[in-house]
């Protein structure tokens, strides 16, 4: 009997324990939610699953939910309809959506475990499930780009077999890139292809994977939130599913930046990924896997398209020759495009590409803007102030160790396309003015030679000597060591 009594006492304590957990989660979640958006005015928890309520619709409900789901102890958070702008409610097969004209703002109870909200409906609008789906896309403030694409693609006439609409939030399209998006939107076929990649006929699609309660599409786009809309669903995504104008991923796509090699494609084998990683590390870059899936199959692609050895040759040549670029391997052939660092390197890369049958489209480097030029010059001045290049009096020979800063300046400039570098040499006021001009020129030549030896293009570096005409005066007295100096000035070529 004592055992039964003890068990009864234990079981009676379970609801109290759960209530304590829910209250703690509710308190912390509400506090954090109000920091993110002051319109949140209530939280309800059932176990570790919570719902937030709002005094009026918030601007970015999906981001808000994502931020709250990361709190310790929280399993999931959803936003009540009160947090959304005109977002339709869940309609379980119904063809009528009720539009509330007045809503009483929910007030949290003392334990935050219960939210009481009354809604009076004064108008009903009959809509079809198709209209309801399109209304959700059009009215959600986070889906403005996707709504525009859906409309342009005429999806409303092709909804019969659609069960799930995969809707990247606007922030995902920002990451996708304005230039690429604009290019797609100017071509109707490309717009349709992009939209068609974002619809599914079944929730059992092989494109969907779920692991550790995280659902992804195509192996990289994470599902932020699921909205039930009639007999369909809208899945909010954190990434745009890639389309190349045909709706088909290339076999392999490798994008070169100054810090990364970004890999994508539908046929990226472990063998390819290992080769790209090795080349990236050798150039001081990292590898980023952007989208598509990686196959364990060691077969690359049909050797008639391209071989692994050819890909490696092209990547090494691209790293040497390009500021930015993209290597694309498709079933129809291989192509590379990019912005070259200089004409000699462009010619070298073109020769390599043609030797493996790749098409080449190269452009000259884009000129630097004034802000970028100013930033480079500020960095150089900072380096020279901290470690000035000095010379022995009457000589173009560096003071021991003072030329080490030139290596840092070379690293700052060596991969910057479209620049000219002028080295100006100076002397102190000792000696004959004409001799000082020659000496300062010799000093400028010494610095320019060090920059060219370090890796700057000979054609981009020039020099001049100004003698003792610009001494460094501190409190009325010349600092002769500082006067024996060089200036390194960058401009857009």
Image: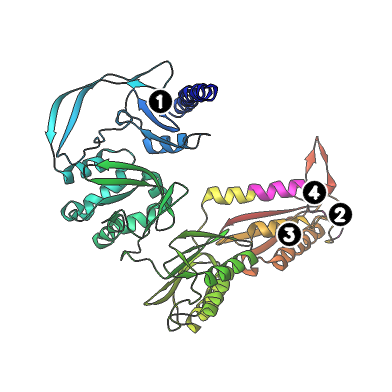
Taking the magenta stretch, the answer to whether it contains residue 380 is: yes
* Mark pair 2, 3: CA separation: 31 Å
The residue at the point 59 percent across, 70 percent down is 320
* Lower position in the chain sequence, tag 3 or tag 4: 3
**What residue do we see at 64% from left, 47% from top?**
378
Res. 431 mark: 2
| Disc 2/disc 4 C-alpha distance (Å) | 13 Å
Residue 336, position as x, y percentages in the image: 45, 72
Point out the tag, 1 or 2, that comes first from the N-terminus.
1
Q: Is residue 199 visible?
A: yes
Verify whether residue 357 appears in magenta. no
Q: Residues within 10 Å of mark 3 (few under 14, many from 20)?
A: some
Provide the secondary structure element on which disc 1 rests. strand
Return the disc, 2 or 3, that comes first in the chain's sequence: 3
Q: Decide: marks 2, 4 in contact (CB < 8 A)?
A: no
Q: Earlier in the sequence, mark 2 or mark 4?
A: 2
Q: Who is closer to the viewer here, 171 or 76?
A: 76
Q: Which residue is mark 1?
A: 43
> Which residue is painted at 13% across and 30% down in the image?
124
| Residue for point 32% across, 56% down | 204
Q: Tell me: residue 388, above or below residue 334.
A: above
- Distance in Å between CA atoms under marks 3 and 4: 22 Å
Dot 2, how many residues are within 10 Å of its Cα: few (below 14), some (14-19), or many (20+)? Answer: few
**Looking at the rendered structure, which numbered label has been put on residue 407?**
3
Viewer-nearest of labels 3 and 4? 3
Label 4: which secondary element: helix
Q: What's the magenta region?
A: 378-395
Q: Position of residue 411 (x, y in %)?
A: 67, 59
Image spot of residue 158 (x, y percent): 18, 56
Q: Are circles 1 and 2 on residues that touch, CB within 8 Å?
A: no
What is the number of the mark on residue 483? 4
Q: Where's residue 291, x and y in %? A: 44, 59
């Amino acid at each position: 009997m004592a055992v039964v009594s003890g068990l009864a006492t234990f079981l009676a304590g379970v609801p109290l324990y759960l209530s304590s957990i829910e209250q703690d989660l509710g308190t912390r979640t509400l506090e954090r939610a109000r920091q993110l958006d002051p319109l949140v005015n209530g939280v309800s928890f059932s176990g570790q699953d919570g719902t937030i309520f709002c005094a009026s619709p918030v601007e970015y409900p999906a981001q808000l939910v994502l931020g709250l789901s990361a709190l310790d102890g929280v399993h999931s958070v959803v936003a009540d309809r009160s947090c959304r702008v005109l977002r339709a409610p869940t309609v379980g097969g119904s063809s009528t959506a009720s539009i509330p004209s007045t809503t009483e703002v929910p007030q949290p109870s003392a334990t935050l475990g219960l939210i009481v909200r009354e809604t009076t409906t004064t108008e009903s609008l009959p809509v079809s499930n198709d209209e309801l789906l399109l209304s959700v896309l059009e009215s959600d403030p986070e889906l403005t780009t996707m709504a525009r694409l859906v409309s342009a693609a005429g999806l409303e006439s092709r909804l019969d077999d659609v069960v799930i609409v995969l809707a990247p939030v606007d922030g995902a399209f920002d990451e996708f890139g304005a230039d690429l998006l604009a290019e797609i939107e100017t071509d109707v076929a490309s717009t349709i292809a992009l939209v068609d990649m974002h619809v599914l006929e079944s929730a059992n699609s092989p494109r969907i994977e779920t692991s550790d309660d995280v659902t992804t599409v195509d192996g990289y786009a994470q599902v932020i939130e699921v909205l039930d809309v009639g007999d369909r669903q809208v899945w909010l995504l954190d990434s745009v599913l890639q389309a190349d104008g045909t709706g088909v991923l290339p076999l392999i796509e490798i994008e070169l930046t100054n810090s990364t090699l970004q890999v994508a494609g539908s046929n990226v084998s472990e063998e390819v990924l290992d080769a790209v990683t090795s080349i990236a590390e050798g150039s001081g870059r990292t590898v980023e896997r952007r989208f598509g899936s990686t196959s364990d199959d060691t077969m690359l692609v049909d050797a008639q398209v391209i071989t692994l050895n050819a890909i490696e040759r092209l990547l090494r040549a691209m790293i040497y020759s390009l500021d930015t670029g993209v290597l694309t391997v498709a079933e129809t052939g291989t192509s590379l495009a990019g912005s070259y660092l200089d004409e000699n390197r462009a010619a070298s890369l073109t020769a390599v590409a043609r030797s493996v049958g790749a098409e080449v489209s190269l452009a000259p480097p884009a000129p630097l803007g004034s802000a970028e030029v100013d930033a480079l010059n500020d960095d150089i001045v900072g380096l020279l102030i901290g470690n000035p290049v000095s010379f022995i009096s009457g000589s173009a020979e560096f003071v021991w160790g003072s030329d080490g800063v030139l290596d840092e300046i070379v690293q700052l400039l060596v991969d910057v396309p479209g620049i000219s570098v002028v080295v100006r040499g100076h002397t102190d006021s000792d000696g004959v003015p004409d001799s000082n001009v020659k000496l300062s020129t010799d000093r400028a030549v010494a610095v320019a030679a060090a920059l060219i030896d370090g890796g700057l293009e000979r054609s981009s570096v020039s020099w001049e000597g100004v003698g003792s005409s610009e001494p460094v005066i501190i409190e009325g007295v010349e600092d002769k060591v500082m006067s024996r100096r060089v200036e390194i000035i960058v401009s857009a070529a």
